[in-house]
Image (spheres, grey):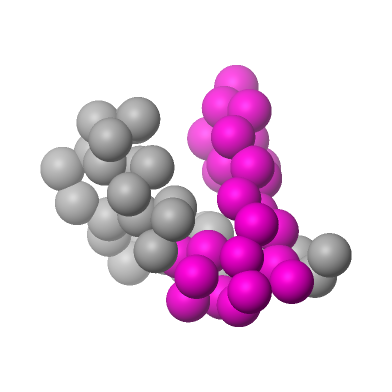
Amino acid sequence: MKVFRCGDVVPGCERDFLGADRDDILRQVAAHAVLDHGLPTVDPDLVRQVEENIRDV
């Protein structure tokens, strides 16, 4: 299992994501970024930041 804490990239966001693997986390975070943070798209820099902060549970 993998975990990502959005607050590690977006200060103040308390949303955590659990997933089976990196791709599962990235799918969840992409939807969250657009729906909850209002981003029009997910750019490569954001993907890099998320990947750097994904941890094993």
Residue at x-position 26% and y-position 41%: 34
- Is residue 46 in view? no
Q: Please tell me whether residue 18 is drawn above or below residue 35 in the rendered image.
A: below
| Image position of 31 (left or right of 24) | left
Front residue of 18/10: it is 18
Q: Is residue 42 magenta?
A: no
Coordinates of residue 8 in the picture (x, y in percent):
66, 42
Coordinates of residue 22 in the picture (x, y in percent):
56, 75
Question: Which residue range is magenta in the image?
Answer: 1-26
| Image position of 17 (left or right of 23) | right
Q: Quadrant of the C terminus?
A: bottom right
| Image position of 11 (left or right of 57) | left
Front residue of 20/10: it is 20
Q: Please tell me whether residue 15 is drawn above or below residue 50 in the rendered image.
A: above
Q: Quadrant of the N terminus?
A: bottom right
Residue at x-position 35% and y-position 54%: 30
Q: Please tell me whether residue 37 is drawn above or below residue 1 in the rendered image.
A: above
| Image position of 42 (left or right of 45) | left
- Is residue 29 in view? yes
